[in-house]
Image (spheres, helix red, strand yellow):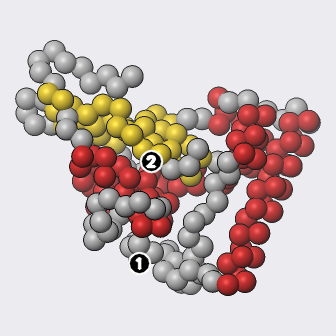
Amino acid sequence: MGYEAKILLDSVNDFDNRLTTFLVTYPRIINAEVLRHRMLSFSSESSRAISLSKVIQRVIDDPFIPIYWGKNQSGMQAKEELTGNALELAKVDWLEAKDHAVNTAKSMEMRKVHKQIAARVLEPFLWVSLIISGTEWQNFFNLRQDYSLPSESLTLQERFNPEFPSQPEVQIISHMMRELYNKSTPIIAGEGYWHLPM
């Protein structure tokens, strides 16, 4: 799946209130960070709504793997990245943890453990898709990305700044959304219009 963002519908009413609805995909590990923005409205994909065998296959086929491996330090932000052998071994550790989670979920499936429990061990390695609507996007963008970065970037690494106080994965999806938001021209929502992205 990987990082994805697209605008489903963008509209503005006679009072200049702009309502934008995104469909986004990002690592499930940052879901709580995104969902804490209460001025937005969310509908999130649930791993409980998908068969356990499909969730397991998603992790096998396309696991989330961090692109920035911060070095342990005090504080909430890793401003320095691991290098050399330490970096390579950290990646091996992550993939071994993924394999162990897959094997654990398969074992639980064989024991007839319900997916609402068994799928949870896979969450660090899953991608999640959400529909997010809101009229107050600047607050989200200001808190979740570094505005000194160019508005358009080509690589995921160019979409975050390790010095900025937001997790790189959150910065990446926020940057992608801001880029789309700035390029989008909302449709005029006249009297009687309903913003219905689906």
Which residue sits at x=41%, y=60%? Answer: 154
Expressed as whole percent of the image width and height from the top left, the position of residue 8 reads: 35, 32
Mark 2 belongs to which amino acid?
Leu
In the rendered image, which quarter contains the C terminus? top left
Which residue sits at x=41%, y=63%? Answer: 159
- For residue 81, what is the image quadrant? bottom right
The residue to which callout 1 is attached is 163
In the drawing, does residue 164 fall left or right of residue 12? right
Which residue sits at x=85%, y=49%? Answer: 104
* Mark 2 Cα shell of 10 Å, populated few (<14), some (14-19), many (≥20): some
Expressed as whole percent of the image width and height from the top left, the position of residue 143 reads: 33, 62
Q: Compare residues 46 and 126 and report the one nearer the observer.
A: 126
Q: What's the mark number on residue 75?
A: none
In the rendered image, which quarter contains the N terminus? top right
Q: Compare residues 106 and 156 and report the one nearer the observer.
A: 156
The residue to which callout 2 is attached is 35
| Local secondary structure at mark 1 | loop
* Mark 1 Cα shell of 10 Å, populated few (<14), some (14-19), many (≥20): few
In the drawing, does residue 176 fall left or right of residue 53? left
69 above or below 98? below
52 above or below 105? above
Q: Compare residues 59 and 72 and report the one nearer the observer.
A: 59
Q: Nearer the viewer, mark 1 or mark 2?
A: 1
